[in-house]
Image: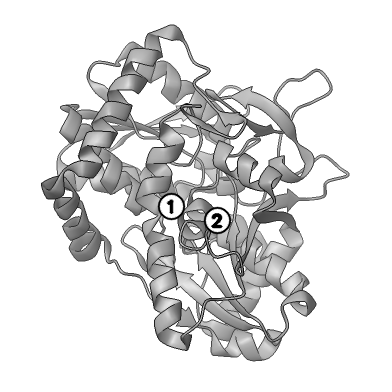
Amino acid sequence: MKGYFGLYGGQFVAETLIPALDELEEAFNSFKKNKEAKEELNRYLKDYAGRSTPLYFAKNLTNQLGVRVYLKREDLLHSGAHKINNTLGQIMLAKFMGKRRIIAETGAGQHGVATATAAAILGMECVVYMGEKDAQRQRPNLLRMKLLGAEVRIVKKGSRTLKSAINEALKDWVRNIKTTHYLIGSVVGPHPFPKIVAYFQSIIGKEARRQILLKQKSLPDAVLACVGGGSNAIGIFKGFLKDKGVELYGIEAGGEGLELGKHSAALTAGRPGIMHGALSYLLQNEDGQVAEVHSISAGLDYPGVGPEHSFLKDSGRVRYGVCFDNEALEAFNMLSRLEGIIPALESSHALGYLIKNRESFVNKTVIVNLSGRGDKDLPILEGIYV
């Protein structure tokens, strides 16, 4: 069925948005077939964003854990995270459609920074919606967005996090649909957004597969990535989904504890529901309303997940687990001290799961997707380390 991954996905939106979604899907299909457009995107990814990113053998971490650990260094990309892959792609797609205005939502701020960055280099008007709570805890990225020329609109209602920012961005898109492209930052939302974002992020997995084969002449035993909405995870999983011998792990934010209800683990503790235009796993309260969630990481502080992840969970192809706040902090500290790499708190969840479950991975080769760098998280960590 069009726009679905098994049972999940769809277009649960206002009727006024359907023509825009149809237009977007048609333009996306044409864009993928346009040789000049794809070549231009590849030039920007290489010469501007800094692809390809290294697949780094973490020797000290390997010795510490007894697990052969490779890090896919998306943190080395321009703007500091994997988000630039998608924003460059979607803004080029918007120009391909004749749109001149870009709107976006952001939680941790990395998608907002990447959107503002790509809008600056490609000459587009840019508005970013950000929850008040996230703006306070991710102030460095708020300042970066403004410096890059974006108008940042702070959302002071609802959860004041990523969920509220998405709600306001959707309202803007409905009002300005003829001139505006809504640049969704993860594999969420109504069709065709999950497929578009996955397409632009799949470069991570393609590179990682090629690089590991060059380095050790064999595929890894496992690939791990953090999952909020799920774009970095889908991006690296795409390179290995057909390789049945490669175990795939998506790690959600366990927050302060599943039993306390203070977490963001939609796949682990949620059930199917509709939010932001698609059917997928969702954290809900007893009344079926979207639940309040928590994660020390702003980028994982989201009550839902992309529909493709929901399908991959049900199919059993990907194993989904949780990493709690304290475990993510342990991983953050360990990687910083052992390898001189300060990871984003999002990525620290994937590494934290590996550290906690190291006995299951002993003597195996594992790739961890290091989706972003940690300087954006220093305000959160200041009270812990200073």
Count residues near mark 1 (Cα–Cα under 10 Å), then give few for <14, some for 14-19, many for 20+: some
Quarter of the figure that contains the C terminus: bottom right
Amino acid on which the number 1 mark rests in the picture: Pro
Mark 2–mark 1 Cα distance, whole angstroms, equals 8 Å
Of residue 152 and residue 226, the one placed in the foreground of this image is 226
Amino acid on which the number 2 mark rests in the picture: Pro
Depicted 257 relative to depicted 354: above or below: above
Q: Residue 9: horizontal and vertical position, in percent? A: 55, 29
Q: Tell me the residue at 64%/40% (across/down).
A: 310
> Is label 1 in a helix, a strand or a loop?
helix
Q: Which residue is mark 1?
A: 140
Residue 169 sits in which quadrant?
top left
Residue 176 sits in which quadrant?
top left
Of residue 159 and residue 300, the one placed in the foreground of this image is 300
Tell me if 152 is positioned left or right of 348 in this view: left
- Tell me whether the residue at label 2 lies in contact with that at label 1, contact meaning CB atoms closer than 8 angstroms: yes
Q: Tell me the residue at 24%/59% (across/down).
A: 45
Q: Residue 37: horizontal and vertical position, in percent? A: 15, 46
Q: Residue 357: horizontal and vertical position, in percent? A: 77, 71
> Is label 2 in a helix, a strand or a loop?
helix
Q: Of label 2 and label 1, which has the lower sequence position?
A: 1
Q: Which mark is residue 379?
A: 2
Residue 149 can be seen in this image: no
Q: Tell me the residue at 28%/22% (across/down).
A: 23
Q: Residue 318: horizontal and vertical position, in percent? A: 65, 55
Residue 351 can be seen in this image: yes
